């Protein structure tokens, strides 16, 4: 089993651990600052959170489909919870970069990338890298070589990859993986 498969299998559990850690910190902060004591059953809460993380994971990996509105609400709730935490600056770009280093952030970004793909929208090199299980610099290298067609938006310095190019690249990756595992 390769490294990507090991990460992928454990992603919902690691994202749940991240979320539970944030929840514990909220509880401690409210108790310390406002004298508010929140009680919850840690085991039942963990089970409910894992169920939600699995839902995001199965959608993000393309294994199951769920109503996008339901997923969007779940993502918004998670982001609201995280934004209240220490260590995440209010600057959105810096926030996303810091958050991407966590399993929870990666799962959210993976789900958002899948939503864009399912809606047949253009995506960034980072989003295509997330969906394909590769490094963003690999996607950027393929763009510069002309293997993947992309344009740079005049406003940002991000590569914008048309849906058709993303679909073609992901299909090639799927075929290569299928051929590799068949041997």
Image (spheres, helix red, strand yellow):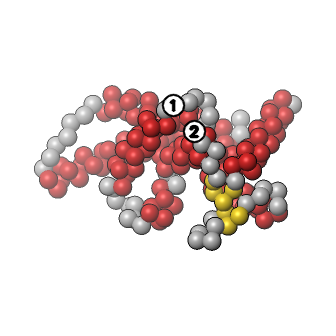
Q: Left or right of 149: which side holds 19?
A: left
For residue 130, above or below residue 52: below
Q: Residues within 10 Å of mark 2 (few under 14, many from 20)?
A: many
Residue at the image position 82 percent from the left and 61 percent from the top? 146
Dot label at residue 74: none
For residue 136, above or below residue 175: below
Image x and y of residue 154, in percent: 63, 71
Q: Left or right of 127: which side holds 29?
A: left
Looking at this view, name the residue that lies furthest to the left. Answer: 35
Q: Left or right of 94: which side holds 172?
A: right
Q: Quadrant of the N terminus?
A: top right
Residue at the image position 51 percent from the left and 61 percent from the top? 97
Image x and y of residue 164, in percent: 73, 48
The one nearer the camera, 139 or 103, is 139
Q: Left or right of 143: which side holds 8?
A: left
Where is mark 1, residue-wise?
66
């Amino acid at each position: 089993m390769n490294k990507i498969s090991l990460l992928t299998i454990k992603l919902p559990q690691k994202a749940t651990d991240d979320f539970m850690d944030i929840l514990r910190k909220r509880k401690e902060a409210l108790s310390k600052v406002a004298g508010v004591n929140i009680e919850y059953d840690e085991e039942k809460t963990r089970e409910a959170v894992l169920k939600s993380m699995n839902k995001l994971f199965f959608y993000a990996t393309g294994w199951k489909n769920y109503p996008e509105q339901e997923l969007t609400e779940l993502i918004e709730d998670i982001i609201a919870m995280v934004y209240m935490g220490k260590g995440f600056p209010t600057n959105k770009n810096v926030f996303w970069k810091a958050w991407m280093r966590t399993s929870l952030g990666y799962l959210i970004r993976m789900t958002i990338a899948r939503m864009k793909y399912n809606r047949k929208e253009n995506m960034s090199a980072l989003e295509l890298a997330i969906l394909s299980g590769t490094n963003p610099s690999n996607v950027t290298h393929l763009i510069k070589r002309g293997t993947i067609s992309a344009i740079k938006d005049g406003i940002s310095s991000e590569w914008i990859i048309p849906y058709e190019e993303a679909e073609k690249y992901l299909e090639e990756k799927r075929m290569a993986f299928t051929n590799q595992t068949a041997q």
